[in-house]
Image: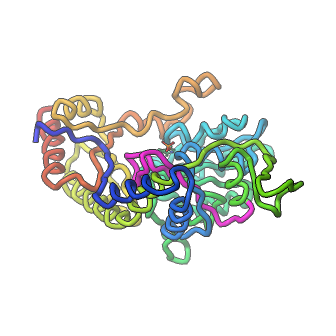
């Protein structure tokens, strides 16, 4: 066991995945072709949304969503400090300002009551949107957040990079799948190798709003349209118009082929993640040295399995010595030098900072074997027995 290194997350690539990519490489389409539309349809149906737009990566999905929602100078958007910095950066790309609200110390998700407080104590119209994050694979109560957003006239971009297949139970006791967008404007996903589904790099935006959908398609390809219904003039079959400033944020067809093939196994792999979570939970539930266990949570997609301990640095170093590579998710965004230079500082969000001091993400990926997981558990126990 010592010989093989165990990372906190990794991709699972099957023979079918490889075949799908090779077949597409031998076809007429390398960049955006028929596999893109197929991937979009299949992904939209996986999360239950009307429309999906495939893009180059999750960050591009955030950027295009912020553009489509017309984020601009003078606008302020609220997000959580416990996320990957891209969730906040998309607002800066568009010239807007980021405000953070603290996390709920039990769920590690954006605290909706803190968001409400912020909105109620600011002049009307101070904020234009909210970017909640389904952190670690746990879905925020989007119904509750959606009600608040409506009350204050805000849009929502749900950063669902950690949570394809996750759901929460709404007030009607129905499963609301993450990315279904019943309570938000758009949701975004990433297909980076550590996420549930990978395209190498890749991203997806889901929405039920047709006009946002159309705007996203145009923004993905330079702001160019060829749709005769949208053209101001028409010189002939070759003619196109660039009507707005967009980007090249396309996904390639062979990446989409990989995504389609990955999606076939997504539900099984999600079940495997939930099994792994249950094994960790049972192994640690009676260990007083590990805190923050909230049980095996219904609907959680377990992108990450997080434990908390005051001896986090010691445990991290000890596990590395055992060829196990846990990770810390995340350094609070407001503590990163770029955001500190904008005025945020240590102490601004006590729950996020306390969480950051203690959190550690243990290996969690579908191909983690039972034997490997037991080795991880034994090593964690060994560290605490000696410390
Ligand atoms: C991975 C991730 C992103 C960015 O996705 P990329 O595909 O790496 O650009 C954004 N937000 C969260 C929460 C992520 O985990």
Is 89 or 385 nearer to us in this picture? 89
Figure quadrant of residue 384: top left
Name the magenta segment's main secondary structure: loop
Q: Is residue 226 above or below residue 322?
A: below
Left or right, residue 269 beside residue 377? right
Say left or right for 165 vs 182. Answer: left
What residue do we see at 50% from left, 67% from top? 42
In the image, farthest residue toward the right: 233
Boundaries of the magenta span: 189-211
Q: Residue drawn 71% across and 52% down?
A: 218
Where is 56 relative to 165, above or below?
A: above
Give the residue drawn at x 63%, y 58%: 186
Quarter holding residue 275: bottom left
Q: As rendered, which of 146 and 209 lies closer to the eye?
A: 209
Residue 117: tell me if it is visible.
Answer: no
Q: Position of residue 286 (x, y in %)?
A: 20, 53
Image location of residue 379, percent across then percent down? 15, 40
Name which residue lies at 59% across and 43% down: 101
Residue 8 in view in this figure = yes
């Amino acid at each position: 066991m010592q010989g093989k290194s165990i990372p906190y997350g990794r991709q699972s690539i099957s023979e079918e995945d490889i075949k799908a990519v090779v077949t597409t490489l031998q076809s007429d389409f390398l960049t955006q072709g028929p596999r893109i539309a197929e991937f979009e349809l299949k992904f939209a149906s996986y999360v239950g949304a009307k429309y999906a737009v495939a893009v180059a990566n999750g960050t591009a999905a955030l950027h295009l969503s912020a553009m489509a929602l017309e984020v601009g100078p003078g606008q302020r958007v609220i997000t959580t400090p416990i996320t990957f910095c891209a969730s906040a950066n998309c607002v800066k790309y568009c010239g807007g300002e980021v405000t953070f609200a603290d996390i709920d110390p039990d769920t590690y998700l954006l605290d909706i009551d803190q968001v409400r407080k912020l909105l109620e104590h600011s002049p009307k119209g101070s904020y234009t949107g909210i970017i909640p994050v389904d952190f670690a694979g746990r879905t925020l109560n989007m119904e509750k957040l959606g009600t608040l957003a409506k009350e204050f006239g805000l849009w929502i971009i749900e950063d669902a990079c950690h949570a394809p297949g996750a759901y929460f139970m709404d007030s009607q006791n129905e499963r609301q799948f993450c990315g279904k967008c019943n309570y938000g404007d758009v949701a975004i996903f990433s297909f980076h190798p550590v996420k549930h589904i990978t395209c190498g790099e890749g991203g997806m935006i889901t929405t039920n709003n047709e006009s946002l959908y159309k705007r996203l398609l145009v923004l993905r390809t330079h702001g160019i349209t060829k749709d005769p219904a949208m053209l101001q003039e028409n010189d002939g079959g070759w003619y196109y118009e660039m009507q707005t400033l967009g980007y090249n944020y396309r996904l390639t067809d062979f990446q989409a082929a990989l995504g389609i093939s990955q999606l076939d196994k997504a539900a099984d792999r999600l079940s495997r993640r939930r099994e792994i979570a249950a094994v960790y939970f049972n192994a640690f539930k009676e260990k007083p040295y590990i805190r923050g266990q909230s049980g095996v949570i219904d609907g959680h997609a377990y992108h990450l399995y997080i434990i908390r301990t005051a001896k986090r640095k010691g445990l991290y170093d000890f596990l590395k010595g055992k060829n196990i590579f846990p990770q810390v998710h995340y350094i609070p965004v407001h503590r990163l030098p770029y955001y500190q230079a904008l005025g945020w500082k240590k102490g601004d969000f006590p729950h996020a900072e306390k969480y950051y001091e203690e959190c550690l993400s243990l290996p969690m990926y579908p191909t983690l074997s039972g034997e490997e997981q037991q080795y991880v558990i034994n090593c964690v126990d060994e560290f605490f027995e000696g410390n």
